Amino acid sequence: MSPLSALLLCLCCVGLAGCGPSSPCPSGQFLLKSRCVLCHPTCSECGGHELYECTTCAVDEDGQERFLHQGRCRTHCPRGLYPDRGHYACLPCIANCELCTDGNICAKCREHYKLQNGVCQTASCEKGQVQDPDTGECIDCEMGCKTCSTEDPEICNSCVEGYFLFRHQCRRHCPQSTYEDSGRGVCLSCPAPCTDCRSNTRCLACQPGYFLNGGECVKQCPQQTFSDSSGWRCQPCHSSCQTCHGPRSTDCDLCLGGNPPLHGQCPLVNCPLGQYFNGKYGECHACDASCKTCFGPQALDCSSCFKGYFLDQDSSCVVHCPSGSYANSATQLCEDCSPNCEACVDTSDNCISCSKSSYKLFLHQGRCWSNCPEGFYETAEGSCEACDSACLTCDGIKSQCLSCADGQYLESGMCRLNCSVRTYPADDGTCRRCPPHCDVCSDDRTCFKCTFLYLMLNGVCKASCPMGYYEDMEEGRCGQCHPTCSSCSGPLADDCETCSTFSPKLYKGACTKDCPAGTYYETEAMECQEGNDCEYRKVIMDFVDWCELNHLQVNASKTKEMVIDFSRKPSSEIAPVNIQGLDIERVRTYKYLGVHLNNKLDWTDNTDSLYKKGQSRLYMLRRLGSFDSTCVSECPASTYSTRQEADGAGLGFCLPCDRACSTCTGASPRDCLTCSPGYLRLIQLCVTHCPSGYYREGSNCEKCDQSCELCTGPRPESCRACPPPLLELQGTKLCLEHCPHRFYQLGDICKQCHTSCQTCTDATPQGCVTCDWGSTLKDKVCYPRCEEGRYFSEEETCEPCDSSCRHCTGPRPDQCLTCHRDSALHAVENRCARCCQAGGNDTDCCVCDRRSALCVEAPQPRLGDEQATDLNVSSRALHHTSAALPIALLLALGLALAVFALVKAHARKRLCWSQSYERLSGSASLNMPHGVPEPDSGDEVDVVYTSRGGSVYRRYSFIHEQDADADQDVDESTCLNQS
């Protein structure tokens, strides 16, 4: 503010100048030039009219809670701070914490720190893990990864032993046309023109037009070999040939020594049919009896065989061809199988087993390969098996996808129609991670929705907005300021905090070229301020004129002027006021109505006089009897004891406590020992309501579990709200970071899949994406192989579930899918617990949600057992309201009508009341998996099962209540007999 010349009072004839102290302003206003001016609407109390001059905050005119931070009242506290609702201020989180709900427990750490037991510690992830940029926690890389990308854990950079890196994926086996480099742990491409290889020097198969010759692909076979186009390989000629077109002695094209053959043969001497030339004796000898014709030099060197015999590669006539060859009936030859084939039938390409060597080969469609082609995976038995129908390629097992068909996207080894939250469908058919701090995006550069407390700007999530933009926390974005603003708090012209160069003057949030009338520009504060000394001088001159008009005269010699400078730095000297040609005397101190004022407003001149005056009036203290003349040894309720020194004597007083305190140790609301009626005890405070993170217990505020923001009790399952980014698990009192198996995400809620689905897109039986082991997926419906109460084991037999489970995926009690009547499933632990009965005191039970058949609260430990281990999940309490009595009466009436209608239906159709099953036509098909109906039935069913008697039956989506008049329970067998 400008230097303010003050204390001028005109006493006509005996003129004086001066003024008295002003009274304080009411709440929501501040004092400006002896006037009370409204604070900015966001402030509860302030020191100026701008939005960044708040001193205290509260609930604003729109009912919005606001918290003080750096002079502003904000709807949200910045990262690293949390809203303290007791004082409506932003207070710091613990060290290295980015998001928290109080000053003790952290929810998310800063970058390069990980969250452990509510405390932020330096992140040092283990092998195969990477730090999540959103949560700061260590998360697992994709299967087989040793190191992976910090931006996307599914992008591998190196692999653990036994896996090989190929296109940022770690695979147990390299794809076709590549080979495994064990030293480097990568898949390398086979050298051209190989189509299959074991190294860069050993080919196993060649491109068309090339022939395999000893591990090398050649365009033309060398001498003493011929090109076998049926298997695209070089085969050896007969030993008598230099070049040939086949393996027999009659297939020579050129003889050794360069002589032309005779009728395709190269004999030394032409002997009669059935004889050969014996060089030792120089005469023709008879062939062996097994040969039809022979060539020599031995009698067993056959060149053709009698019918029923086949000429092998050793020129012998045999009944059965040796390993690695097959009997060709047309040529009566034992011809070689395709390369690396141990046994084949009918043709060289119809291999039935592969050769055993230092490297493993896999049989696929009659040929042996070092790796299986796309769409197949390598089994331990040495064969290529087809991938799951959802996978385009897979590795290790049929359901571990490596790539997906068009229209589906790979995520965590599974093919999905839609990518999950914080991922986007990339062009390579995978679900890639969104940029840091982004919940919804279209690619790695464009974000549509940022995580909590991050702000969107041009498709990027920012921790804070740059100059020229303001933080719109409600919309989660950086909004552009008005063109006149350089920085601002909103989009309007009067939301400016600093000004642009072409509108440099700030006044009440608006930027203009010049300051408004009655204000001046304060360079240090960079704003227009009221209190211009020109206006001050004009007021004095108007007063002098008024005096003259009323025949009064100002006594200028007795008029004094005192200047009080409120500016942030000393201003230049201002000329004194001149009245009637006389400069008014300027003084540093002034006494008015017995009060000494100085131009520093430090009141030091009053200290001695005030102290003396206080001593002279001590008799007032000695007349305390006018209030209560009783001296007591102990102060009464709602007061506290204190002592003061006066006239050298110590005086004791009982002074009132703050209205919030019933008993106290001082006047502050922080000095309470017990609270007044209507107040609750919170540590050393008395408050009207428990703040976030605390719950009411009698007349005290007790702290919630560290995972809760709001709660009704001390345990994790007493939470009442799931703060972002946690998700509500529908039908329970749990909050999770990710939806578990058998749940799908819908907004910020995890909803339950149909019982038959392992993962799904919605709650219907036709919304399955994957099934449990032992179920068959067809048209998005999972058909189980085993009947109720049994599961499909690894030995591919139906084995009994644990007795606590109605349906299950394995033998243990923590592998339940559904539970028996009067029991409910704990969604995270997958185990069944008995429902707690009203008025009972059992502890081995859970509160059941009848609609979802899930445990609302975690199952309690048995009496005498050790304290149950806390669930290893972040949980929040869900809000459940009790039904009102009129609603209960209406429901009872509706249930009575429904029971009456179902009894009538039961009489007509003889439906199964206990299990809601109906026998289907026929029995289990021999061609279909156990319990699967014919696919053309067209029925929309929930789940199909098979009874122990072999009959196929179906469970409908509606559930009948058991007939209350029945004399005995209806079991599964009874149910099937009735239908």
Image (cartoon, rainbow, N blue to C red):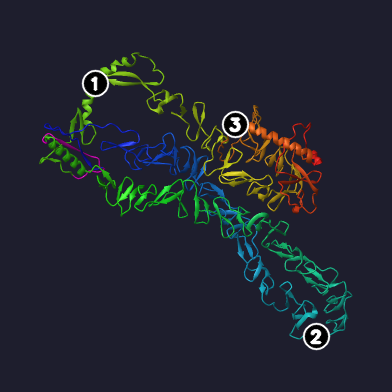
Residue 897 is drawn in which quadrant? top right
Q: Which residue is mark 2?
A: 262
Q: Amino acid at mark 2?
A: Leu
18 with respect to 843 (left or right): left
First in sequence, mark 3 or 1: give its number: 1
Q: Provide residue 152's location: percent of width, then percent of height.
A: 54, 54
- Image quadrant in which you'd find residue 811: top right
Q: Amino acid at mark 3?
A: Ala
State whether the magenta stretch is mostly helix, strand or loop.
Answer: loop
| Foreground label between 2 and 3 | 3
The question of residue 676 being in magenta is answered with no
Kindly identify which residue carries mark 3: 884
Residue at mark 1: 615
Q: Quadrant of the C terminus?
A: top right
Mark 1 vs mark 2: which is more N-terminal? 2
Disc 1 marks a residue whose amino acid type is Gln
Residue stretch in magenta: 556-572
Secondary structure category for the residue under label 2: loop
Q: Nearer the viewer, mark 1 or mark 2?
A: 1
- How far apart are labels 3 and 1 at the CA level? 69 Å
Q: CA distance from mark 1 to mark 2?
A: 148 Å
Element class at badge 3: loop
Q: Nearer the viewer, residue 759 or 611?
A: 759
Neighbor class of circle 2 (other Cα within 10 Å; few <14, some 14-19, many 20+) is: some
